[in-house]
Image: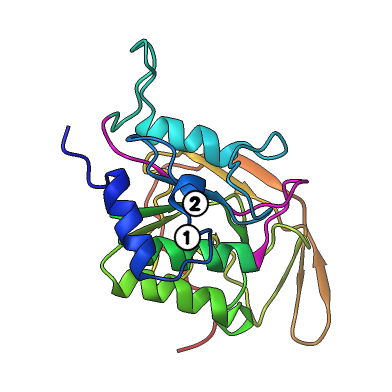
C-alpha cells in the first residue's frame, strides 16, 4: 500500500533527468514491488545473473515477499530497485558501479545496499570516480550500506610490514566515510592470516596462521595495542 514509487512516478523522473540506464519506462519498470531495474554491466533490463547471485539473495533477505506468503524478508513490503553491476561472467565493473550509484541518487532511493567489496585499499589508491559517487549518494541523504567483506590488509599477500602493521581494516568500499558497514558483534573467533612480517630493515620474521577462539586465551585483562603509524 502507498508505495514510494508508482509507474507514473518513475516515468516522471525519467522524463526530467538523463539516466545512465534506459530512459524508457517500459525498459526499466517491472512492477509495484520492483519499480526500477537495469543491468549496468551488460546494458539491458535482465538483472538476474547465474554467474553471481549474491546480490539477488541479499535482496531477498532484505525485502523478499513471495506471492504465496511462504517467503518473507526483513522488510517484505519494501520496494526494490535492482541494479546489476557485473558482466556476463560475474566480474564487477567499476564503470557499471559508478553508473548505478549515480542513477540511484537520481531516483532518490532511501537506501543503497552494496553487496560487493574488494580487498582493502588506502583511499589515496582508490577510484576517485567511485568515491565521488558514494559521496554524492551520502550527501543526498541516502543510507549507503556496504558489505563488511572477508578481507584485511594481509589477506592476499600473507605478509605485513612494520610501516603498515594494522591488518584490522576490512574492505573497500566499506572503508569510506560515506558508507556504513556492520560486522559481527558477538564473534569469538580470531582468524589471523598473515604468515610473515617484514621489518623496516628488510628482515622477514616467519610466522604461521592462527585460528583461535577466545577460549584459548589465558584468563585475565588484555590491553589493546595500536602498532600502526606512530602518532
Q: Residues within 10 Å of mark 1 (few under 14, many from 20)?
A: some
Q: Residue at label 2?
A: 147
In front of the other: 214 or 135: 135
At 83% from the left edge and 78% from the top edge, which residue is drawn? Answer: 203
Does residue 192 appear in this view?
yes
**Residue 115 horizontal/vertical position (percent):** 52, 48
**Residue 229 horizontal/vertical position (percent):** 54, 84
**Residue 190 horizontal/vertical position (percent):** 55, 45
In this view, 218 is above or below 77: below
Q: Quadrant of the C terminus?
A: bottom left
| Sequence-first tag of 1 and 2 | 1
Range shown magenta: 77-94
Looking at the magenta stretch, what is its main secondary structure? Answer: loop
Please indicate whether residue 224 sits to the left or right of residue 121 in the image.
Answer: left
**Residue 68 horizontal/vertical position (percent):** 37, 10
Q: CA distance from mark 1 to mark 2?
A: 29 Å
**Residue 97 belongs to the span the image colors magenta:** no
Q: Quadrant of residue 103?
A: bottom left
In this view, 83 is above or below 15: above
Q: Secondary structure at mark 2?
A: loop
Q: Secondary structure at mark 1?
A: loop
Q: Quadrant of residue 125?
A: bottom right
Please indicate whether residue 141 sits to the left or right of residue 173 in the image.
Answer: left
Please indicate whether residue 222 sits to the left or right of residue 45 in the image.
Answer: left
Does residue 227 appear in this view?
no
At 41% from the left edge and 60% from the top edge, which residue is drawn? Answer: 104
Q: Residues within 10 Å of mark 2 (few under 14, many from 20)?
A: many
In front of the other: 186 or 215: 186
At 54% from the left edge and 66% from the top edge, which residue is drawn? Answer: 99
Q: Residue at label 1?
A: 23
Q: Residue furthest left?
A: 2
Amino acid at each position: 500500500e502507498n508505495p514510494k514509487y508508482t509507474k507514473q512516478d518513475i516515468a516522471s523522473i525519467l522524463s526530467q533527468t538523463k539516466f545512465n540506464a534506459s530512459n524508457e519506462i517500459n525498459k526499466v519498470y517491472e512492477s509495484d514491488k520492483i519499480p526500477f531495474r537495469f543491468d549496468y554491466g551488460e546494458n539491458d533490463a535482465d538483472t538476474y545473473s547465474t554467474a553471481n547471485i549474491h546480490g539477488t539473495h541479499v535482496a531477498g533477505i532484505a525485502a523478499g515477499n513471495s506471492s504465496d506468503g511462504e517467503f518473507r524478508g526483513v522488510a517484505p513490503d519494501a520496494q526494490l530497485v535492482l541494479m546489476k553491476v557485473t558482466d556476463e561472467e560475474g566480474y564487477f565493473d567499476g564503470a557499471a558501479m559508478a553508473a548505478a550509484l549515480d542513477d540511484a541518487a537520481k531516483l532518490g532511493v532511501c537506501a543503497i545496499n552494496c553487496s560487493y567489496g574488494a580487498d582493502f585499499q588506502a583511499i589515496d589508491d582508490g577510484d576517485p570516480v567511485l568515491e565521488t559517487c558514494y559521496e554524492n549518494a551520502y550527501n543526498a541523504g541516502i543510507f549507503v550500506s556496504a558489505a563488511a567483506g572477508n578481507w584485511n590488509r594481509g589477506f592476499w599477500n600473507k605478509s605485513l610490514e612494520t610501516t603498515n602493521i594494522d591488518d584490522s581494516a576490512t574492505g573497500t568500499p566499506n572503508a569510506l566515510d560515506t558508507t556504513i558497514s556492520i560486522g559481527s558483534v558477538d564473534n569469538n573467533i580470531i582468524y589471523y592470516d598473515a604468515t610473515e612480517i617484514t621489518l623496516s630493515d628488510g628482515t622477514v620474521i616467519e610466522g604461521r596462521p592462527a585460528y583461535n577462539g577466545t577460549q584459548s586465551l589465558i584468563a585475565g585483562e588484555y590491553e589493546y595495542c595500536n602498532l600502526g603509524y606512530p602518532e
